[in-house]
Amino acid sequence: MKKVTIPAFLALCICALFVVSASAKTQLTYANFFPPTHIQSQLAESWCKEVEKRTNGEIAINYFPAGTLTKAPQTYDGVVQGIADIGMTVLAYSRGRFPVASAIDLPMGYTSGVQATAVANAVLNKFEPKEFDDTAMMFVHVHGPGLLHTRDKEVKTLADVKGLKLRGTGTSGLIQAALGASPVGKSMRECYQMLQKGVVDGSFHPVEANKGWKLGEVVHYMTQNFSSAYYTTFAVFMNKDKWAALTPDQQKIIKEINTEWATKHGIAWDEADKLGMEFFLSKGGKVISLSDAESKKWAEAVAPVIDGYIEKASKKGVDGKAVVEFIKTNM
């Protein structure tokens, strides 16, 4: 048998330590439906890198954008089942499943993504909803106001809305109906062609979609109906067992990152809205502001949508009125 020298022995030890260290690294997966070029996808990827950086490489996360690991509507269940370890999706894709969080999407009058995101996370911290008990919730973020955009008609008053066919789903559809319009339940992917061909008269969408989805090319008027705008809540969550397997120090680090990144996502929505406005105006779009008196009329018209939420939430054992009041006092 060959004699092993001390330097060779030390080298073997170092290699062995490296192998043990590499095998001890926690490998996780992150599923997201946003395409890799979208700012919200880029922020999600930067979250993964920040976790690896601050845990000194103890946690490594493989990022899967564009629905390559789980499709958007199946992401939450995919994380629960362990298909993905971490996921981001729209909570409204699982309509009725999250009665506390769904209050965030109501026409509460937020004027920015930063404001809506801050309120949304405050709601989770305050009520700690049991609806998320099958995952470890990281944080939520919310896009800016979903405003009324029309193709050919200027909408200056509530009376102008009556009879319009507007693309909208979920909460936005309920709001449109309350305002006197006829909602057409189609996805955002179909919106451009529907507007271009005149199938619908307009759409409710956040200002960022004028550039992100090129809708600014096919709508000519934007009514700033902040008092009756809709919102969409996006959530980031982790498989419960994977979260429990992390050390207390690792969990603490991730919670700190979550707080920072929730704010980053909200800011990104607002920055995207600015770009969407620039694009809309560059295409000759006209912005219509509502007077305080007119804005109040719109708010009164959509009040039944909020009342309807409270009623439905109570049937699920949730004090919807308390959630709504908390949102109003924390805006």
Image (cartoon, helix red, strand yellow):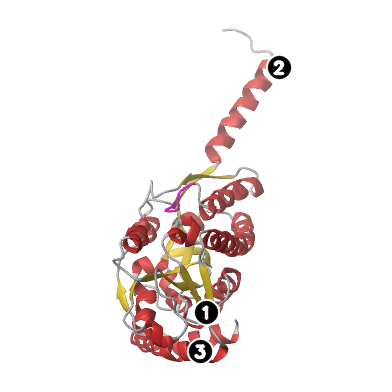
Q: Which amino acid does the dot numbered 1 rest on?
A: Phe
Q: Which mark is residue 23?
A: none
Mark 3, other Cα within 10 Å: few <14 / some 14–19 / many ≥20: some
Which structural element holds mark 2?
helix
Q: Which amino acid does the dot numbered 3 rest on?
A: Glu
Q: Which residue, given by chain and number where applicable, does mark 3 sit on?
A: 294
Asked whether disc 3 touches disc 1, contact meaning CB atoms under 8 Å apart, the reply is no
Q: Which residue, given by chain and number where applicable, does mark 2 sit on?
A: 7
Which structural element holds mark 1?
helix
Residue 163, image quadrant: bottom left
Closest to the observer, 89 or 276: 276
Q: Which amino acid does the dot numbered 2 rest on?
A: Pro
Residue 139, image quadrant: bottom right
Q: Earlier in the sequence, mark 2 or mark 3?
A: 2
Mark 2, other Cα within 10 Å: few <14 / some 14–19 / many ≥20: few
Instruction: For marks 2 and 1, give the CA distance.
Output: 72 Å
**Which quarter of the figure is the C terminus placed in?**
bottom right
Q: Is residue 319 visible?
A: no
Q: Which residue, given by chain and number where applicable, does mark 1 sit on?
A: 226
**Which quarter of the figure is the N terminus placed in?**
top right
Which structural element holds mark 3?
helix
* Residue 292 drawn in magenta: no
- Observer-side mark, 3 or 1, equals 3
Mark 1, other Cα within 10 Å: few <14 / some 14–19 / many ≥20: many
Instruction: For marks 3 and 1, give the CA distance.
Output: 11 Å
